[in-house]
Amino acid sequence: MAKTTSLWHPCDPDHALILRELSKNVNLPCLICELHFNGPTYCCWDCNVFLHKSCAELPLKTQHPAHPQHPALSITITTINICDKEGCHDEFCRDCNRKVFDYRCDDCSFSLDVACVALTLSPPEKEEEEEKETIRHFAHDHPLTSFPLNKPIKVECRACEQQISGPLMYGCPVCCFYLHESCTLLPGEIAKHPFHPQHSLTLFTERDFRCNACNNNTTRAAYGGIKSFIARMFRGKRYNRFLYKCNECRFRLDVQCATLVLPSDINQQLDCGTIQHFSHQHQLASFDVKMKSTGLHCKACRQKISGNVYGCPDCRFFLHRSCARELPQEMVHFLHPDHPLIFQAEPRYVVGGLRCNSCGVGSYFDFVFSCKRCNFDLDSLCALQTFSAFKEGIPTEIQHFSHDHPLTLCYSLSGSHDDCTVCGSAVIGLAYYCSTCNSPMLSNQEKRFVLHKACAELPQQLEHPFHPTHTLTLIPGQSDSSFYCDASCRYTKGFAYCCNECRFHLSLGAVPLKPTLKHQPHEHDLTHFETLGAMQCSYCGKRTYRDSYRCVQCNFTVHHGCISILPLSIKHDIHFHPLALCDKFIDRFDEQYCDACETTRRPDRGVYYCAKCNFAAHIGCVIPSVEIEETRPAQLEKVDREIASLETDIEETATNIETMPTKLEAQRKRLKELRTKRDDLAF
């Protein structure tokens, strides 16, 4: 059996990273480049660290043409906290403890993104291939060279600020200046742009500006959102941005809005027809938008503009064709059946803005349906979504078993309601709410009652393969306490399915999961879990936070990597018969021994076993340590040496306790941890 590769990396100074194959069911972000991936990964299961193979194998020190004055740049890790969730302590939240990787000069403050260094490490082109194309670009002093992007790297185009995904790009490695191939072909001047037809627009670069079409402020929107912007500001990276601007006035367009609708596009598509829509004073032209705008939205559904649209580019007014057809001028809505609701394209202004009676958001809306006599308002999105659901036969009012009052169908915008009472996650889309408990007279401290539509329709009784012996009952959760899910091995809040007889709890997030994998050493099929609580793999003994298979009935958990790498049967020189992989083995004797290393072993851990000879061995004793883990004797010897050394240090420190009390306390804490670790290994 070929050995599995391992390496040491500064992102995890305490453990070697082992090369494993992630399952196709999981899509994890690489700690270095932050791109999601599956397949080959260097990982440490104990520390929940996962790296692309290409990212993990980047050199720790390298020279770079952008900084020739000093000999080498070293990879550096800085930890920052950019999580915007109040009181967040989720162990899987990367923003709570975001690690920023870059290359820094040991002699000065110069630094480079990992992606910029990785691009210069691409393998050289073959000699027989044609020479790379070189172009000149107004925004850069050096020539730009074409090259393929054939590896997962998170590098952004300086023109459109979108991630470059290949297959071809242009760049200057010395200055870390990169462009999409298509962005090198942007027109230098646009005459009579639909957003600003009175003057020509010229392509420039500036540090900060506000786009007059989508109204985005570039100081916050640049480089993939506010979190990425904060991270870049932390590293001191700010660049000039591409824009089209008018030399005669202060009009500005970012590249995406400028290329969204060009004069040639409008002229070619005007034959598709125009309409006079009641929602706008000008005629709307029919055309297709090939790319998705980051800041321009359909006025009716508020989704980003793309595909078939009607629009007035001069006013930056757009409607999807489907929205233009479905938008009525008047509707009789079940939330206000006494009077018809009248469409208003220019809703009245009130102090603090209008408050939608469906989603509860108080703001100014582009479109609104109103009954002025009753001061009742629905923004267009809520009105259309709930009215469409009503026409499809979805109940507009239900009585939920967990609540005293009837619940009314509504549509919730992102963050407009409290979290769902059943599952605890944000309510977006169709939902049911209690108009009594959601009264505006409620204080801010009182929690409103609202349910996702899907959560409201959950059955009260459930048969589930994770607990086949009894029927599970849906029970309300307590707002001030959490429960332990026996499937995902994590504490969670909200409703749960419960078996009171067995004290078994199943979180709602685990309900859709089903056993899918037949693993020969185990009697039941296994279920894949992308994330788990603090469990240990029954084969290698390491923690199983990610990408694991589990039998909930037997409490048997194993890494996907261990299943894929461990042979079901192996011939080894420690025994003359083939050894079979077993999920566990309990000997008839009280003491459970490994017959290979003659130390005690845990009976609930997997072994390699010969039934003819009643021979059982640690998996780590049969498979070389780099392929699965260090053998128990090697780990015990290592821990014993550290304990002995630490006990000596404590004796020396204790004589100076008046001057070093903090050091002594830390040493004793570490000694306690080591002794606990030794007990686990020796059991």
Image: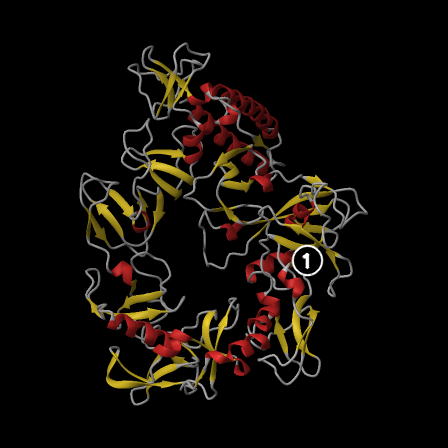
- Residue 84 versus residue 487: which sits nearer the camera? 487
Q: Amino acid at mark 1?
A: Gly
Whether residue 469 sits left or right of residue 73 in the image: it is: left
65 to 315, vertically: above or below: above
262 to 137, vertically: above or below: below
Residue 153 screen position, x and y as percent: 60, 49
Residue 266 screen position, x and y as percent: 54, 77
For the point 74% across and 51% down, the residue is: 109
Which picture quadrant has residue 368?
bottom left
- Most extreme residue toward the right, as rendered? 69
Does the rendering let one see residue 406? no
Whether residue 422 sits left or right of residue 560 in the image: it is: left
Which picture quadrant has residue 597?
top left
Query: Which residue matches tag 1?
Result: 236
For the point 18% across and 45% down, the residue is: 471
Residue 632 screen position, x and y as percent: 47, 21
Whether residue 84 sits left or right of residue 606 in the image: it is: right
**Which structural element holds mark 1?**
loop
Which quarter of the image is occupied by the C terminus?
top left
Residue 275 screen position, x and y as percent: 43, 84
